[in-house]
Amino acid sequence: MKKLFCLLLTVLCGMTFAACGGTTVSDDPDDHTETETYEEKLFDGIDAVFDESLGYYNEHPSVLQDGTTRYLFYTRNTKKYDASTDSIAVRVGTYKGGEWTYGEAKTCITVSENGWDSKSVFGADVVKGKFLYNGKEYSWLMSYSGSDRSDRMDADIGLAVAETPDGEWTKVGSEALIEFNSSEWDNVGLSYYPGCIESSLVSFDKSGKVYLFYEESEAFKSNYVYELDCSDLGAIVKGGRKVVETTGTSDLGTSNPLLYGGDFLYDNDSDSFFAAREVRTTATAEPKVADEVEVLRASADVLRRIEQGVTQEEPADWWSEVGDSIDADATADMSDQSRIFGYMRIFSPCIASDAYGYLLEYGKLEVFFTTQACEGDERLPSDHADAYKFSQMIHTLVITY
Amino acid sequence: MKRKLLAILLAVATLTSVCAAGAAVSAAEPAPLVYQADGKLDGNETFAYELSQAQQVTGNALAVRLFVKNTYNDAFPLAVSFTADGKEYSWTEKSGTLTGIEYNAEGEPSQRTLQWREGGAVDVPYLFNGEVILPFSLLGDVQISEISALKMLFTCSANSQFASGDTWLADNVCLYFYGIDCVTVEEDGTLSETRTELADFTKTGTEGVTLSAASGQPVGQLRTATEEDMVVAEAFIAQYNASCETIGDVKLVESFDFGDEFAGIADGRTADELYRHFYLSGQESDYSLTAGEGEGNSLLSYNCDSLVYDAGRNSYAGVHFNFSKKDATDWSGAKGVTVYVENTADYLVSFAVEIFQFNTKTGLLEQYNLNDVANKYKTLYAYNVETGEEFSYHTQTFMRIPANFKGWIRIPFSQYAAPAWSLAPAYGNEGVLDFDANPVVKISLTRLFNVNLDATLLIDNIGLYYSDFGVGNLFDDSVPSIRQCLEEGTVA
């Protein structure tokens, strides 16, 4: 699977460029004028949906299908082995020969020069609709997390718009839409919070109104959803911010499970939401991320109903599991002796949806997820001690119900 | 303010007078004795009255006429005994009920069930204005002819388990005593019109009365009620019988103000009475009633002062209150509790709104809060009146109030639970909120001290909400938002 990853754009210019570690660097993050050696990532199970060299993290997938075209948005670094070059990228997927093939990465947004997302951008989701911004109507809205810290802590959530999913993306304003202020929820002196992350968009009306799900990690970690009218992005109307109750789910070691890394889609026929989530990690070695993802389903009443009044009954179990969870066994490739154990780290899932964040096909959920090598894996190159941080890949499996 | 007439029966001087139960005397008429403890009782204190002349017993019960203006708990435990024929008699019931006759602001009587407490004491409810009826039949098969002395034992609050396990920092008890009569309880529970006066404190004053403590000097003091005392009592009784104010779908059970009933009372006295409406426990914390927005509006300002923090003591502080209005004890039909709160700090502060249901079946006070045996998150709902934002959020044990928040928090009753410790047999909490059967008589605002040092909370209103609601209603207008509930809702 080794691939030569040289993008010899200089050829187009009729110039000769020696593949000897040349250092020409373009401002365009997609313009890999620098010659790079392709390094294969560690495969302990099924293939990735696309291949990119070790040294680039491919994580936080968000996949939508508009007509017969798919768009796979994800987080990647634009410069090899450089975590300070966070970006949101998109690959266009086409269906040929019974499978989807994803094209080359195109960068949608990168970190800003200054401000709330000046050091990192990650965890994007995209939805179709009608969104007016600066007098122009856009058809695509992106939500993403950003931070002015390179470790992605204290993240906020902002928006961007585009006319086409793989077109030019424009950030909406210079301020975040959902700001995380740790002191607002902190009285014990802690300052190290992930903040607002894992945004997930679902259209309410296939126009300007959207649900924005996200995870807020302050002293209490909770899933929330905002009701937003983004018809006019210059005057966004915020409805209430609601806790997404998680009863029915369970995690080891806590009475308060979370829809970690939750990605949501809506099923109009059953008036219910599907959510892909990470099962709470028990990992003690880096990366301390999940080793399993699962899909859950709840009536849309989970966002509408508040249990009022005196009740002697246990709270409603909103969520129930759909199909089997995706763990190491599920990701094993039994046809290849070197891949029979599957992946040890499985996290950051999403479910492929239609352009509006709705269910694509009854009875079938295509789940995308991220895997990552573990720190200290001897197969990683010795000249990059933190190579595992740049080893993330995106895979997919189908869950039927 | 209408001068409500308080004292009943006692203006009649004849030994076997006939009194209309609803008759009343004005503030200028003979005044009762007032027992008041400004500090904390060191031990039980005894009010003893020696009759100038032994009186022949008539009827089938003893009736103690009093008004409980202030008590540290929802009820004041009062044990009554008497000396007859050289022998002392006292009631020894430990549980069960007895009858009281309560008079409203117009002096109209109604029966009220009272509760026996451990050791033969009767729980006399907060703001009870009436007569405690003690049947002689409960004393056993005894023949009583003449009563020569009467005693009332005031139980101190130290280590008061029946309260909530708290030790109060001050008692501030204030009782008005009018007299004690022999009465006849009819089969239907009403009193016959004929009664025999044993003591009329509106005439005797402190003559013949001694106040003693179990050890040392009594903390409480006796005085003859002043005219102002009587006007204050009338105001309390009028307020107690008034309906709760409402804001939209919210019935206010505590607004940290005194109403028009106190308009005729000097501001200083009103402020003092309002201050004494609240009680502290746990670590030394401090509260005050401070001016809020709007004329005559005051807020409870509650602070955990780092200067007095004692790391050797428990970590909690609490301010507590009983309800000023009878209507506030009726929580039937309500969906949850709501609190108007301001956090002026740039960081999160927290406190708990603990509710106390009086279980009429067990006679016990039951505590409920946001504790949960599994430490599960509880969901609260908020409306920031300054930003217009509505949101729900998780909390645990205590209500978390985000930095600079100003507005209403709603806590559905579904989020309340009996704390695990209270379900132990020693406390007898049945763990079932049933507001159709049981009144709620008290609220405690408690705070974890060390994480709230020097963080002042401002609380304006505590109420009950009666509507289903949504958090904002941009996508779903089938139920009103919190703001709409407050602006357009009604208490159904």
Image (cartoon, coloured by chain):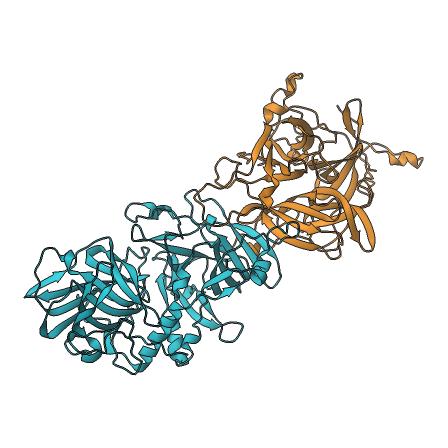
Q: Is residue A187 visible?
A: no
Q: Residue at x 81, y 55 (%)?
A: A134
Q: Quadrant of the N terminus of chain B?
A: bottom left
Q: Residue furthest left?
A: B86
Q: Position of residue B323 (x, y in %)?
A: 39, 64
- Residue A61 appears left or right of B462: right
Regarding residue B285, the answer to whether it shows in the image is yes
x, y percentage for residue A117? 70, 50
Residue A251 position in % (x across, y down): 51, 36
| Residue in view at x 51 percent, y 72 percent | B292
Relative depth, front residue between A217 and A76: A217
Chain A: what color? orange
Quick check: B93 above or below A297? below
Residue B163 picture quarter:
bottom left
| Quadrant of residue A81 within the rendered picture | top right
Residue B125: percent from the left, percent from the top?
A: 30, 63
In the image, residue A50 sits, relative to residue B481, either above or below, namely above
Q: On the rendered structure, is B415 left or right of B49?
A: right
Q: Is residue B251 above or below residue A57?
A: below
In this view, the residue in front, A173 or A43, is A173
Q: Which color was chain B given? A: cyan
Q: How many marks?
A: 0
Name the residue at the bottom extreme: B28
